[in-house]
Image (cartoon, rainbow, N blue to C red):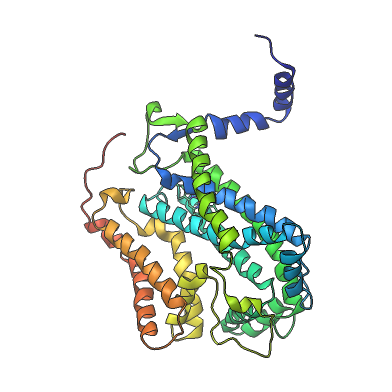
């Protein structure tokens, strides 16, 4: 059969810049383990969530004004006057929460199936870097509507840097661009909030490069050697990812249309007022576990260190976990400890939303203790655990 003109044009182009071969290799023929469960849908969902945030963000930026006198009203203008502005804003707002839900599940999946273990350590590191970048982006994004929580959240969190010995105060003033959170702060946060998602995008590229170098892990967690253990990514996983997206869009669309404020805080509909401090300053839900850790430590400096360490410890997880077996399915000791770790995250999140008083302090401290204890006992768990028999092949 003779080639069509389109085919000829593609070949001509591909010979000079092999972008089509690259796509065919990495998204069509790419050998994927045949036993992946729905837990492996969350990577592609995270990618789609990121792209949705970037797209809706670009349209919001066309109408948003990063000026302390105009920011709050410009959001109202988007909600009321801009065509479909309410839809774009609600998608961006709900999208941020859904992005975190997806990424939290994606990370939990990685921990459960030991996907952080060799040779996927760098893939895991890229993930942890993405997570830090996501948190920075979300934090700055929340400041932009310039409501009470925007202002006071920004004030409390940026003030944490003042604990850095000797230079802390100077660092905070430098970050604010003045002597309090103000117009300069709002401007630079807007600039960085626009920039960082593209940095995340670049790190996701490295994340996927590392993934494609050693291929996906799988629910059994064993190294796959035979060709028959793999199936091509297309059509098997393209169709599965599209199905996953369909399921994701049901609660997402529901929240966007019927409950966009459900995960937000009503105080952020009061314009920022530096003279009135809200009764409780609470961050967005996805920061609450780490906020709880910050407050569990009585000393401010060590509280900040603990909060950062609570996430940064993930960098060394591949070395803390000394077991040769990847999947928690075959690890009778690791599995319950990990499930308790996940449950503990919810406890931390719950405590993070409560005022730091009475019983909440005690629960917060116990939960913080377990958060770190889980990681620190992993070398011993690997040593003493007797794994169940692991199958040699699929
Ligand atoms: C923007 C955020 C992210 C995107 C778009 C993303 C994307 C992906 C994709 C498409 C995959 C392959 C499909 C899958 O295994 O689900 C993947 C795998 C993986 N990701 Fe992510 N990821 C993100 C964040 C993270 C984070 C925060 C971590 C951990 C801290 C992480 C750790 C991993 C690991 C360990 C794998 C390999 C899983 C396996 O093969 O079993 N990712 N990621």
Residue placed farthest to the bottom in the image?
275
What residue appears at the point 69 percent right and 87 percent down from the top-left corner? 274
At which x and y percent is residue 211? 50, 43
Counting labels gives 0
* Residue 73 pos. (x, y %): 76, 73
Q: Is residue 213 left or right of residue 90?
A: left
Q: Residue 307: in sight, yes or no?
A: yes
Residue 167: image location, x then y, percent: 63, 82
Looking at the image, which is closer to me, 53 or 254?
A: 254
Front in this rendered view, residue 41 or 8:
41
Q: Quadrant of residue 136?
A: bottom right
Q: Residue at x 27, y 62 (%)?
A: 380
Residue 323 in the figure: left or right of residue 65: left
Residue displayed at 39% across by 83% down: 360
- Determine the residue positioned at 29% across, 62% down: 337
Write down the quadrant of residue 340 in the picture: bottom left
93 horizontally vs 194: left or right: left
């Amino acid at each position: 059969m003779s080639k069509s003109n389109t085919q000829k044009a593609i070949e001509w182009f591909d010979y000079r810049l092999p972008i089509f071969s690259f796509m065919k290799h990495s998204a069509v023929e790419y050998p994927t383990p045949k036993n992946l469960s729905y837990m492996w849908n969350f990577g592609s969902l995270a990618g789609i969530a990121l792209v949705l945030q970037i797209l809706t963000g670009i349209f919001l930026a066309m109408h948003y004004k990063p000026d302390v006198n105009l920011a709050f009203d410009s959001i109202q203008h988007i909600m009321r006057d801009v065509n479909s502005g309410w839809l774009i804003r609600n998608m961006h707002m709900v999208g941020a929460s859904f992005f975190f839900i997806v990424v939290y599940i994606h990370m939990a999946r990685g921990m459960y199936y030991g996907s952080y273990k060799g040779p996927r350590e760098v893939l895991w590191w890229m993930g942890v870097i993405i997570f830090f970048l996501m948190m920075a982006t979300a934090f700055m994004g929340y400041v932009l509507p310039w409501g009470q929580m925007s202002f006071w959240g920004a004030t409390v969190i940026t003030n944490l840097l003042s604990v850095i010995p000797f230079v802390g105060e100077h660092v905070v003033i430098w970050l604010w661009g003045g002597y309090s959170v103000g117009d300069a702060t709002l401007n630079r946060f807007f600039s960085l909030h626009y920039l960082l998602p593209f940095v995340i995008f670049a790190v996701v590229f490295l994340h996927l490069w590392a993934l494609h170098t050693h291929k996906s892990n799988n629910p059994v967690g064993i190294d796959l050697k035979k060709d028959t253990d793999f199936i091509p990514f297309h059509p098997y996983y393209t169709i599965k990812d599209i199905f996953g997206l369909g399921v994701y869009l049901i609660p997402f669309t529901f929240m966007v249309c019927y409950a966009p404020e459900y995960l937000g805080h009503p105080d952020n509909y009061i314009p920022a007022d530096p003279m009135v401090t809200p009764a409780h300053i609470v961050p967005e839900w996805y920061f609450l576990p780490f906020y709880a850790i910050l407050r569990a430590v009585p000393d401010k400096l060590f509280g900040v260190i603990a909060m950062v360490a609570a996430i940064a410890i993930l960098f060394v997880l591949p070395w803390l976990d000394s077991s040769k077996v990847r999947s928690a399915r075959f690890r009778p000791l690791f599995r319950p400890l990990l499930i308790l770790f996940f449950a503990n995250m919810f406890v931390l999140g719950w405590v993070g939303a409560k005022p730091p008083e009475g019983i909440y302090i005690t629960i917060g401290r116990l939960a913080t203790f377990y958060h770190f204890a889980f990681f620190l006992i992993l070398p011993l768990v690997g040593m003493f655990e007797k794994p169940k028999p692991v199958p040699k092949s699929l």
